[in-house]
Image (tube, rainbow, N blue to C red):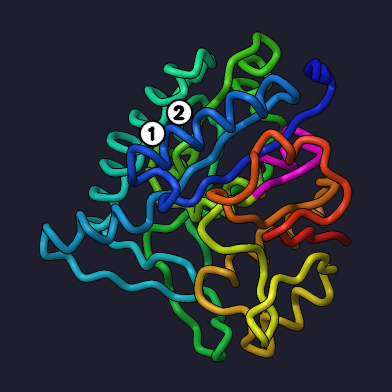
Amino acid sequence: MRRDPGSRLVLKLGGELLEQADDLQRVAAGIARLARRTAVVVVHGGGREIDTALAAAGIPTQQVDGFRVTDAPTLDVVVGVLAGAINTRLVAALRRTGARPVGLTGADAAVATVRRASPITTVSGTTVDLGLVGAPVSNGTPQLLTDLLARGYLPVVACIGATRKGQLLNVNADTLASHLAAAIGASRLVIAGATSGVLNEEGRTIERLTVRAAARLIRSGTASKGMVAKLEACRAALRRGVGDVLITNGREVRLERLAEARGPLAGCTQVVR
């Protein structure tokens, strides 16, 4: 299938898909095929590798509803793991497929200008200050991304942002992907990880989910931990005009099918307005 010159898609990759060499190369090959059908911006996380690096450094880890509480020592590790190890490794894997990847962070050329995030109210009702965590601010269309896409490049963005004064902040990868999908006018956001979509109370994949139903899953506790951040990212993307969001298992789905899929896909939840 030939690439649609007007279509854009943001693909968020969970770090668990990028740890093992076989997984990494399989995902890279799928991204390369996807990029032949639509313009793609990749955003990646790296939570488990960050946890491992923090443990090795003797730095305690704390997460709240899928968001990492980040102090200065933690931020140094986050930047090194995401921008250094994982981003470079993914770019190299994509190069082997013949794609034209460009490794970036949200701090590059104002791809994602952020402010320090306000304290959050957790699902349990407590208020938590996340520390050195960024919340993207509306800053128009990120020109670097649109320029790269127009020239046939494949931006690969690590989830780190910078304030207007140049302070680096950790940004949740789902949050950043949602923001960029809206900012570039993407028709679809895909959140790919190791979970087969959003699960109901019986542990079965929900094929189609509205924003209101997603909010109910969060309030009821059916959606917990990292899925809370994903559903909040879905809601934000849809509010800002993204057509739909797919939450899928990146090991099970053929990524190239996600460009134009309209009906249900196995192991995939479609989130709509």
Left or right: where 216 falls relative to 47: right
Please name the residue shown 27% across and 69% down the image.
61
Kindly state the secondary structure of the residue where label 2 is placed. Answer: strand
Judging by the rendered image, the residue that carries numbered circle 1 is 87
Q: Quadrant of the N terminus?
A: top right
Label of residue 104 in the image:
2
**x, y (%) of residue 4?**
83, 20
State the residue in front, 100 or 110: 100
Amino acid at circle 2 = Leu
Please name the residue shown 50% across and 31% down the image.
28
Write down the region rendered in magenta. Answer: 180-190
**x, y (%) of residue 39?**
71, 24
State the residue in front, 36 or 271: 36
Amino acid at circle 1 = Asn
Disc 1 + disc 2, Cβ < 8 Å:
yes
Please name the residue shown 50% across and 88% down the image.
126
